[in-house]
Image (tube, helix red, strand yellow):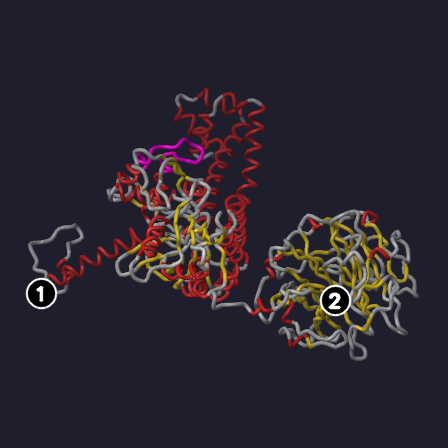
Amino acid sequence: MADEPFQDKLPDDDGTIGGSTDVTIEEEISYSFLEYAMSVIVSRALPDVRDGLKPVHRRILFAGLEAGLRPDRHYRKCAALVGDVMKKYHPHSDQAIYDALARLAQDFSTRYPLIDGQGNFGSIDGDAPAAMRYTECRLSPLAMELLRNIDEETVDFIENYDGYEVQPSVLPARFPNLLANGSSGIAVGMATNIPPHNLGEVIDATVELLRNPDEAADDARSLEIAMKRIKGPDFPTGALIVGRQGTLDAQMTGRGSVKMRAVCEVEEGPKGNPRIVVTELPYQVNKARLALKIADLVNAKEHRLEGIADLRDESNRQGIRLVIELKRAAVPQVVLNQLYKRTQLQDNFGVNTLALVEDVPRTLNLGQVLTEYIAHQVTVITRRTQYRLRRAQERSHILEGLIIALDNIDDIVALIRAAADAEEARNGLIARYGLTEIQANHILDMPLRRLTALEQDKIREEYEELQKTIAELQAILDDPSRVRSLIAEELEDIKEKYADSRRTRIVPDEGEFDIEDLIADEELVLSVSRGGYIKSVPLDTYRRQGRGGRGVKATALKEGDIVEHLTTTTAHSYLLLFSNSGRVYRLKAHEIPKRDRTARGTAVVNVVSMRPEDEVAAMIDTRDYESYRYLLIATRKGMVKKTLFREYDSTRREGIIALNLKEGDEVVRVVPTSGEEDLLLITRKGKAIRFSERNVRPMGRTATGVIGIRLESDDEVVACGVVRDENDDLLLLTEFGFGKRTKLHHFPRKGRGGKGVIAAKLTKPRGDIIGATVVKAGDEVFVISDDGVATRQGVDGISRQGRPTTGVRVMQLGEGAKISALAPMVNEVDEGGQDKLPT
């Protein structure tokens, strides 16, 4: 009997067992334990990757919604909510439910609390919450974002444990809660421990994946994007993350150990003794136990912690303040190192990103978590749109019947009056006007007040609006990119409402350092020649000169080569090199080989992986990717394109696409913008057009752009500027060294795509426009000629003139030489106005 298949001993489909069956204890334990293990894994301990919730948390939030505990309603006793959850959805201990509820309300346990609690919900000292009969709660505003649209058939509902109620199998979860709040739990044979992250960073990563579906489909690229946006865990208690390796391991593999450290400051006590003040603790560290542990180490008979004189807790509602008084002879850093080593002032968070994916436990990396979340959101928004479309179509169908009735109101009234009963009237309407039964019933139910002219107009207006709504909803369903864009827009709304600054700072480990830490953040002049040579020269190499100065020798160039681009920046800044073919390459300024002022430089292709046939068209420097909102690219043929600056944040050595160019066109200038300013395009033949940046809608990184200025056949764009202050000037420089300043208000705002106005009166001796830039009083510019001579001078010495003028001499040129480049300086000079270095 024991050798028979175990399935033969299971109940039949009707739940009965015919007679008795002998089963070995090994088989019974194996089967029953497997059932228990799967129940714990799926129904208790592990979160769903889609909404980041365990079943008990999901049931608490849904029961709160059902009970009307919205953020704008009054608080209610926690006991009432716990009772609802236990009665309807979660047949387990009321204390276990209350513990889960209380944790959702603790701002030291949950990064973004989902329960708004009133009363004593415990403390970081390990104090338990007050009994549930005393405390009160309601849903937090952010919890409503997890539940939003749940009434629009966005998720499946399943029966509860006894079949009397239904509950959601997952929440719509309009933000990535699994990463934002993290999760921890012990199942059978496995455990999960996911740290919380910053909501703003998580949403930024999700939005970038949504707007780049091709890259999101690639596991390696999705992980790269996620790691670029999400710096690391962001704990509710703040503190420090020491070192990057643990965070990188966790992000790349789903497993890692993150070293956390308390924020400690060394102060001087009233008697001159040093003291260590702890203001932030590592996540999940009990402050009272920590203080007790320190006291035990100080009082220990063996391996005593030396140097500590007193310990007291001065924490209050303003924050944590644990004061460790030191003896006069103690060295604070030595004591701190001992505390880090022997107490939880330094602790590790073991990351294990284990979550349920289609009810199967999987360890996920950072990119996979976001990819699964996006797939869930696509389903949610698609189902929501289908629901709204169906409701709109149903209402439209009814309104069509009402409009038919209004168009034939006299005949219909006569038909109804002549009918013996409602059934005969309904059948008459259906037969005569081809109405459906639903339409006929609504006509019969229509009150007489709907026959007024005003009410008739309202019905027709509602019908017309519904047709637009139906068309819009159908368009969303027909275009997957519209669905992803909608998700991205709604996520950005959530970010704007609820995102906050990081609480946890990431600092290098003692054994870790960045090579950049050893490089002085000095000011540099970066130049690129038309022949493809790039170099870095300290700014103080060039002395400041007055208008008309001859300059100093800047570069020893090959015959026929000229300096075409230059910028002033700092060594730690990023430099973006835009090629004429529409690609962009990123590097740090200090990575550009430093050369003598007169040296030629290094070939660009030896610094970045630019194609040999390409040329550098523009350079942009920035300290970080939050400095600017947009980058605007102008092309030689007058096209402009505006793209979010952060979309150019890429570490790819081979570069990324900056824009797609039309045949025969090339990039000529790139400028950072805020999205709210006016733009100026200046052409070689002295034309300029000014238009609002709002007329250029933001586009994706690979778009082509729109027309900025219409050009004559022999003209081309040479510069692009941003208008931030009407009192600023536009500085124009011609190829033979003449220039002028013109007030920006002399350039009237026009519509995008016009031919522009005259910016300068050009003559053959002065030459065409070679460069232009917007300047303020007191600014300096850097000018270089095609024979390698450079000058640095203040703009105040350059004459201010009207638009149709020719300008004055700005730089004396050698025989046959021409101006090749113009760039503004990043910093002002000393008031003395003279460079301290000799020529």
- Residue 44, percent across and down? 29, 51
Dot 1 corresponds to which residue? 2
Left or right: 720, with 810 as reference point: left
Dot 2 corresponds to which residue? 540
Left or right: 65, with 534 as reference point: left
- Residue 451, percent across and down? 54, 23
> Which residue is at 28% across, 39% downward?
88
Q: Closer to us: mark 1 or mark 2? A: 2
Left or right: 359, with 202 as reference point: left
Contact check, label 1 and label 2, Cβ < 8 Å: no
- Residue 389, percent across and down? 48, 43
The span from disc 1 to disc 2 (Cα, nearest Å) is: 92 Å
Stretch in magenta: 64-81
The count of marks equals 2
Amino acid under disc 1: Ala
Amino acid under disc 2: Asp
Judging depth in this view, the residue of 640 and 799 nearest the camera is 799
Judging depth in this view, the residue of 553 and 666 nearest the camera is 553
